Amino acid sequence: QVQLVESGGGLVQAGGSLRLSCAASGSIFSINAMGWYRQAPGISRDLVAIISTDGNTNYVDSVKGRFTISRDNAKNTVYLQMNNLKPEDTGVYYCLYKNYETWIDYWGQGTQVTVSS
């Protein structure tokens, strides 16, 4: 089992910044990926950004140049720095831990990000 604890959501005006954090604990496998998904009301949960243990990253096109995902492997923590936020970035952000040994995905409880115009 893997437990994920998220922090850093909140309310911000358009153009502002927020930093999300997600710490994983429990049965951590050395080869994994951690990332962030976003879910707005009535819309599916979609990938925002993901990073592997060796630092390879992938972003959805709409956040490229504005969001940066990073991780601290020693702390099993992933971060999402969100700059120049837009109202369309609003949603619940869920942390994902993907175990490449068991191919089981674990999800955090979600943190609300609201961007006002």
Image (cartoon, grey):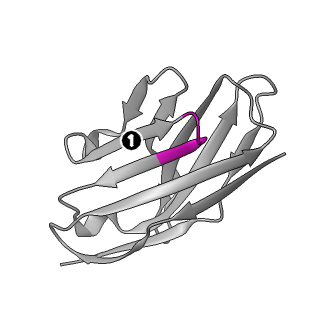
User: Taking 18 as reference, is 2 left or right?
Assistant: right
Q: Where is residue 109 in the image (x, y as percent from the top left)?
A: 65, 65
Q: In which quarter of the image is residue 100?
A: top right
Q: Position of residue 73 (x, y in %)?
A: 56, 33
Q: Position of residue 5 (x, y in %)?
A: 64, 60
Residue occupying image coordinates x 24% and y 40%: 64
- Determine crowd level at label 1: few under 14, some 14-19, many 20+ residues with C-alpha closer than 10 A: many
Residue occupying image coordinates x 75% and y 35%: 28
Q: In which quarter of the image is residue 19?
A: bottom left
Q: Where is residue 45 in the image (x, y as percent from the top left)?
A: 54, 54
Residue occupying image coordinates x 52% and y 68%: 111
Q: Does the magenta stretch include residue 75?
A: yes
Residue occupying image coordinates x 43% and y 22%: 56
User: Circle 1 sits on which residue?
Assistant: 69
- Name of the residue lying farthest toward the front: 74
User: Taking 70 as reference, is 52 left or right?
Assistant: right
Q: Check the picture and name the quadrant holding the N terminus.
A: top right
Looking at the rendering, the stretch of residues picked out in magenta corresponds to 73-78
Q: Nearer the viewer, residue 54 or 66?
A: 54
| Vertical side of 44 occupied by 103: above or below | above
Q: Is residue 105 magenta?
A: no
User: Taking 106 as reference, is 40 left or right?
Assistant: left
User: Taking 97 as reference, is 62 left or right?
Assistant: left
Q: Nearer the viewer, residue 50 or 55?
A: 55
Q: Nearer the viewer, residue 46 or 6?
A: 6
Q: How many marks?
A: 1
Q: Nearer the viewer, residue 92 or 53?
A: 53
**Amino acid bearing label 1:** Ile
**SS for dot 1:** strand
